[in-house]
Structures are given as C-alpha cells and as structure tokens.
Image (cartoon, grey):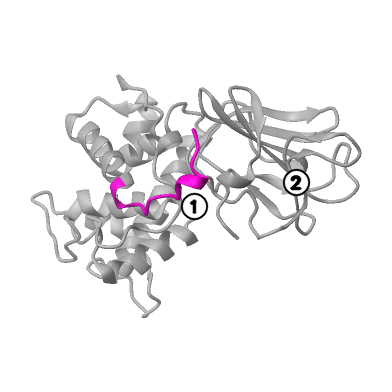
Amino acid sequence: TGRPAGDSAATGPANGALRAGTVPGYLIPLFTAAAASSTCRLPPALLAAQSKVESGYQVDAISSAGAVGIMQFLPGTWATEGIDGNHDGQANIFDPADAIYGAARLDCNNLAAIQTAGISGDPTGLMLAAYNAGLGTVLSCRCVPAIPQTENYVASIEARAPELAAAASPTRTGTGGELSYPLAVRAVVTQTYGPHTDGAFHPGIDLAAPDGTPILAATAGTITYAGWETGYGNYICLAAAATFATCYAHLATITVAVGQTLLAGQPLGTEGASGDATGPHLHFEVRINGQTVDPSPYLPPA
C-alpha cells in the first residue's frame, strides 16, 4: 500500500532560474543545463533539491549502503544509467556533471515509465519515489510507497525546491504560479486577449510559430480534456489546481490523453490550424474558476 502522491507538482517550483546563494555557484550551470536538456523538462530547483537531500552537494559522498557521488548512485544503477555529461570521454560517478546529467535522465526515464503505466497522482512525487525506492516498487504499488525513508525523501525535496528557485515577479504570479512558455520556440503574438475592433471578445492570446512546433504544458497538472472542440479544433485543457487551468487550441496533433499527469514543459502535441483558424498558431488560454483571464501576465517575459 502507500499514499497517492499529492498535488505538489501543480504548485511546486517554476522552471526558472535558481536563487543566488542557495546552491554552490559552480553547480548552478550544471543543474540548469541538465534540467533544460532533460526529456521531461525538469525544474532546475527540483534537481538541485534532489542533490541537496541526496548528498548535501558533496561530490565524493559515499553512503553506508554504497551509494556514491553528488546524486548518490549505486554502482549497479550507474552501470546502466551513468552518462558522460561533460563529454570528456568517460562516465565518472564522482564527476558532478556526469552524475547530475545522469540523475536527470534517470528521473525522466522513471517518469515516462510511470506515465506509461497510467499511475495517477502527483508526477513529481512518484518520480522522486522511484529514484529513492526503485521504479519497480512504485509500479507495483502505483503510489508513493509507505516506506518512511521514501516518504521523507519526497517530502524533503518538494519542500526544499521552492526555497532554491528564484522568486517569480509578483506581476507574473497567479493562482497557478508563473507559467512556462507553451511553445518550444518563441512566437509572435498575433492576437491579444480581450475585445477587438470587430466587437468580438478574444478569450486568449494567439501565438504564431512554424507549423508543427511542439506545444508544451505551461504548468504541471492533469489533462481534463483532449479532443475535438467546435471552433477550437484539436483542443487540450490541463488543470494545475482546482481553480486554475491552461487550455491549448488549433493543434495539428494531440499526444496526451484525459487523466494523464504532466510536468511543466512536457509536450502536449504540435501546433497547427485545426478548427476555425486561418493559419498555424496556438490559441492559449488561462482559466481561473472556469473564467478566462489574460494569459500574458502569467507568461515569462520575452
């Protein structure tokens, strides 16, 4: 048995920079780059918090159980998951770059397996539990297992990560927190939120990028709608909290399903021109208590 993971992924650290002075300076570029290049777009603060709990940022740490290095890999795990993060020709368990990149890859691989298995709950908590207790344990109980060490591990990292993240600007913070950018590339705003000269009210913003550009989750949460919607075409809504949601319209393809849990930055589909659209673009909405609000203040600055 065990507990289902909570909702901390929806309210956890944003994908932004690490706060100066909270992490050894030479490690900040490693956590930032490893997180940015990870397949599941890990928040840098989450990866840094994981390292703090694992080893206290000690690159030569060795535990009583034989776990080694700044990310506390067991040698057997390193044999299959270790990578040459700094491209110096060897995968060294004591090298912080190799270990941090290896941990990011292991986290994302575990998360992918958890999502493929259709396990519901907080994806961050489940992912961290898999790192600590083993993926097989999480897949078996379909939960954060009721192992005190694992429960404390997950809680400690999720509590510490927001302390390491750079504070968001108050002008860009709302119920769901500062959002990640919903496209894989920066796009031109072709239509803003609100009433227009033709009298119509536009309930979101339109972002025009090349056809087929990946659409990314702007926040962690659960998919509540993924399908065809009149006018919107291929349409997705993702609930980050009970009162906060982001929605994405006119997609060419949808790669998620209702009930699926995601981290911010994970792909939802590709940009297109389905539904009532004159050309490829993303129609992006933010909804609070079911009502649309201007998404612009919630997005990272250009």
Residue at the spot 20% in from the left edge and 34% down from the top edge: 152
Residue at the spot of label 1 = 41
Q: Nearer the viewer, mark 1 or mark 2?
A: 2
Q: Secondary structure at mark 1?
A: loop
Magenta stretch? 163-175
Quick one: 270 or 93, which is closer to the camera? 270
Query: On the picture, is 152 further left or further right than 130?
Result: left
Residue at the spot 33% in from the left edge and 76% down from the top edge: 90
Residue at the spot of label 2 = 192
Q: Secondary structure at mark 2?
A: loop
Residue at the spot 22% in from the left edge and 68% down from the top edge: 94
Q: Quadrant of the N terminus?
A: top left
Q: Amino acid at mark 1?
A: Arg
Q: Position of residue 270 (x, y in %)?
A: 72, 48
Q: Quadrant of the C terminus?
A: bottom right
Q: Rate crowding at label 1 as few (under 14), some (14 to 19) or many (20 or more) other CA atoms within 10 Å.
A: some
Q: Does residue 167 show up magenta in the picture?
A: yes
Q: Rate crowding at label 2 as few (under 14), some (14 to 19) or many (20 or more) other CA atoms within 10 Å.
A: some
Q: CA distance from mark 1 to mark 2?
A: 27 Å
Q: Is residue 289 above or below residue 63?
A: above
Q: Does residue 234 show up magenta in the picture?
A: no
Q: Main secondary structure of the magenta part?
A: loop
Quick one: 79 or 245, which is closer to the camera? 245
